[in-house]
């Protein structure tokens, strides 16, 4: 129960802080060191066309860099439809920018705090879902496409990411949030060829309770699996093995683990490594190659200060040359 209370309180503080940040006029800053940026869920696109790095994440703002060391931003890059289900000023979480077939796609979680879809165990659940925007440029503006919704309106979903499976079809992999189902799931849904919408229904890949490392205590103080699924990111090793990094909790410690698909496809079955893959109090990572080909993991550190979460982007060295993802030391851009 302590883990749940800590998580929920931290979530509320984080949400209030995010709202306060969004209400302020943002001033573009230059020559900002990476570890001076406060940002959750950092996603970095290394764009060979422009020879630039583009970083986004929760809050939906964009940072640009030529060398990963010094950054310029934040920039507003989304133009959502105020008449859509998102409302006029949606919260934006866990934004990602993917280059795909000549365009740039903005995968993100949008929340309309004015609309409630459910109340579970006393918790009111806001309208929140994964959605995709598009642009011809990596720095936007990113605008809506064809489908008004990608996932069911009565489900809180988050942290959508892109993966093209062995069948050559694009999919969104996302989390169905624990606040409603009380045992978060990792799911997939097929995307249209131009990513302008979804096809069919979502399918469960695994549940939070399948993890051997994520833990919490119930109301009686008994150990049990944690309920949170967060931050999926897919990758392949040099041997062709399909893996997924994802994040949960070990009691009140934010933690990232890894699972591998036995079939080599999204359908799994997914086998979870017994131990976390990154240091404790780091999570929601992704992998990218630098403009000169070096594999890195972008991830945020997680620290609670007087009940408020402070999250800072960091880079780790990474290796996919074998049969598994190996995460190395912290990487400092020169």
Image (cartoon, grey):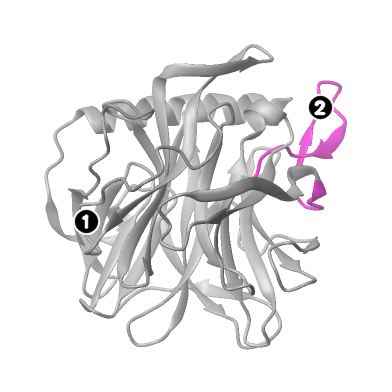
From this view, report whether residue 199 is shown above or below residue 236. above
Residue named by callout 1: 140
Which of the 4 image quarters holds residue 168? bottom right
Which of the 4 image quarters holds residue 233? bottom right
Q: Residues within 10 Å of mark 2 (few under 14, many from 20)?
A: some
Residue 54 falls left or right of residue 201: left
Foreground pick, 135 / 289: 135
User: Magenta span has 48?
Assistant: no
Residue 332 drawn at (x, y percent) = 37, 73
Dominant SS of magenta comes to loop
Q: Residues within 10 Å of mark 1 (few under 14, many from 20)?
A: many
From this view, report whether residue 80 is shown above or below residue 19. below
Residue 126 drawn at (x, y percent) = 49, 22
Q: Nearer the viewer, mark 1 or mark 2?
A: 1
Residue 166 falls left or right of residue 158: right
Residue named by callout 2: 218
Count numbered badges in the picture. Answer: 2
- Mark 1, secondary structure of its residue: loop
Q: Are marks 1 and 2 in contact (CB under 8 Å)?
A: no
From this view, report whether residue 67 is shown above or below residue 62. below
Question: Magenta part of the protein: which range?
Answer: 210-229
Q: Image point 68% across, 63% down: which residue?
A: 266
From this view, report whether residue 109 is shown above or below residue 192. above
The quadrant of the image that shows the N terminus is top right
In this view of the protein, can residue 307 be seen by the observer?
A: no
Q: Image point 38% across, 28% down: which residue?
A: 85
First of labels 1, 2 by sequence position: 1
Residue 43 drawn at (x, y percent) = 40, 59
Q: Image point 62% across, 55% down: which residue?
A: 246
Whole-angstrom CA distance, mark 1 to mark 2, is 45 Å
Residue 54 falls left or right of residue 240: left
């Amino acid at each position: 129960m302590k883990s749940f209370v800590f998580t929920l309180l931290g979530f509320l503080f984080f949400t209030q802080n995010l709202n306060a940040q969004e209400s302020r006029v943002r001033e573009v800053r230059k020559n900002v060191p990476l570890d001076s940026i406060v940002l959750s869920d950092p996603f970095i696109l290394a764009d060979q066309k422009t020879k630039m790095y583009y970083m986004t994440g929760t809050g939906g703002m964009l940072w640009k860099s030529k060398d990963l060391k010094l950054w310029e931003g934040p920039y507003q890059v989304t133009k959502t439809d105020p008449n859509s289900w998102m409302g006029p000023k949606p919260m934006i979480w866990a934004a990602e920018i993917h280059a795909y077939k000549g365009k740039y796609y903005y995968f993100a979680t949008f929340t309309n705090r004015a609309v409630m879809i459910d109340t579970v165990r006393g918790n009111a659940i806001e309208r929140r879902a994964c959605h995709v925007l598009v642009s011809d440029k990596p720095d936007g503006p990113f605008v809506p496409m064809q489908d008004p919704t990608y996932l069911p309106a009565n489900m809180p979903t988050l942290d959508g990411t892109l993966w093209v499976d062995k069948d050559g079809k694009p999919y969104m992999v996302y989390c169905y949030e624990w606040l409603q189902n009380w045992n978060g799931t990792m799911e997939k849904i097929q995307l249209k060829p131009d990513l302008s919408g979804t096809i069919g229904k979502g399918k469960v890949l695994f549940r939070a309770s399948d993890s051997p490392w994520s833990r919490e205590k119930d109301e009686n103080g008994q150990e049990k699996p944690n309920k949170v699924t967060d931050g999926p990111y897919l990758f392949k090793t040099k041997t062709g093995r399909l893996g997924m990094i994802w994040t949960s909790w070990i009691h009140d410690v934010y933690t990232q683990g890894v699972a591998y698909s036995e079939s080599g496809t999204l359908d799994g079955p997914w086998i979870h490594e017994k131990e976390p893959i990154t240091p404790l109090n780091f999570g929601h990572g992704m992998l990218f190659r630098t403009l000169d080909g070096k594999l890195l993991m972008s991830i945020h550190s997680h620290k609670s200060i007087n009940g408020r979460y402070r999250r800072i982007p960091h880079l780790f060295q990474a290796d996919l040359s074998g049969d598994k993802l190996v995460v190395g030391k912290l990487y400092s851009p020169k």
